[in-house]
Image (cartoon, rainbow, N blue to C red):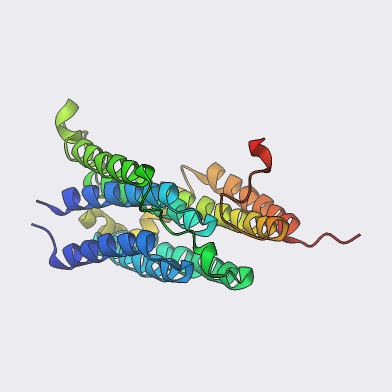
Amino acid sequence: MDTGTLLHILSAWLFCMGLLALVLRRNTLVMLMGIELMLNGVNLSFVTFAHELAQISGQLQVFFIITIAAAESAVGLSILVNVYRNFGSIKTDRTKTLRG
Amino acid sequence: MVNPVIAILSLVIAILSLTMIFVKSPISSAISLVGLMLALGGIYALIGAHFVAALQVIIYAGAVMVLFVFSIMLLNMNEEEAGEIDYHSWKTYAGLGVSLGLTGLFAITFINWAQEKGLPVPDIYTLEKIREIGGNVVAVSGVLFSQSYVQFELISLLLLVAIAGALVLAKRKVD
């Protein structure tokens, strides 16, 4: 097994563990961490492909993804603070105004 | 052959991702995520993506995780807020099965990507070529400010909008 194969498997693992955190946990903070984990898996995939194909554009995309992820987590966490203020909890079971 | 340091870091990342999901308190999840991101930065540095490694440590392990830890502190959650995994529900095991199956599927796809239509022709940026140019950061910035400077400017607009949005959302309403 070469390094590229190992890193491809690791990126698949990271993406699916992020998905698992998103599906299993009922705490919105940990769900946001799961989204970050999925983005990290995608980043690792980009860098590995760029490494294998002797490209530089994959690393460029990672630069953009990291910036967007930082913006996303800033907005997401301030939404979270607002949810906590309005519902007194950040568990997803409590916020069911839109469920009808 | 796999670089042994990369293999060890991969193992650490796999274990830390599991602890992030299955540990109870959010602060332990956040600490495992910090460790995971630092280890991932190490892997990036070892395969020659130095600029991405620096960004990973500064932005992800630094800024984003500080934001997470700060909001954990701000929210002051009690025991039952942790949102523990419900081990009695079949949905938990269905999610686990789907996730592990997807891992296998993605891994097989990624490993076999070259065999499908033959190897794509590699670009010029081999490690030797990058060393000749003057390092990874020089190569990345060369491409960034020649081919994709429009995206770079648009990203700055996005950051401005995100700052405004976060401020408006987190501000207390004053009558």
The answer, for residue B134, to whether it is visible in the render is no
Q: Position of residue B59 (x, y in %)?
A: 48, 64
Please name whichever residue, B134 or A96, is drawn nearer the observer in this view of the structure: A96
Which residue appears farthest toward the front when viewing the image?
B88
Measuring from the top left, give residue B164's x and y in whole percent. Answer: 72, 54
Residue found 61% across the figure and 72% down from its top = B76
The quarter of the picture where residue A97 lies is top right
Residue A32 in picture, x, y percent from top left: 50, 54
Residue placed furthest toward the right = B175
Residue at the far top in the pictured view: B117
Residue B86 vs residue B139, the one in the foreground:
B86
Which residue is pictured at 63% across the width and 37% down the height?
Answer: A99
Up the image or down, A69 lies above or below B32; here it is: above
Depth check: give the residue in front, A29 or A60. Answer: A29
- For the residue pair A68 and B23, the one nearer the viewer reads as B23
Q: Is residue A18 visible?
A: yes
Please indicate whether residue B146 sits to the left or right of residue A40 in the image: right
Give the percent coordinates (x, y) of residue B36: 34, 65
Question: Does residue B111 appear to the left or right of B162 in the view shown?
Answer: left
Where A16 sits versus B168, above or below? above
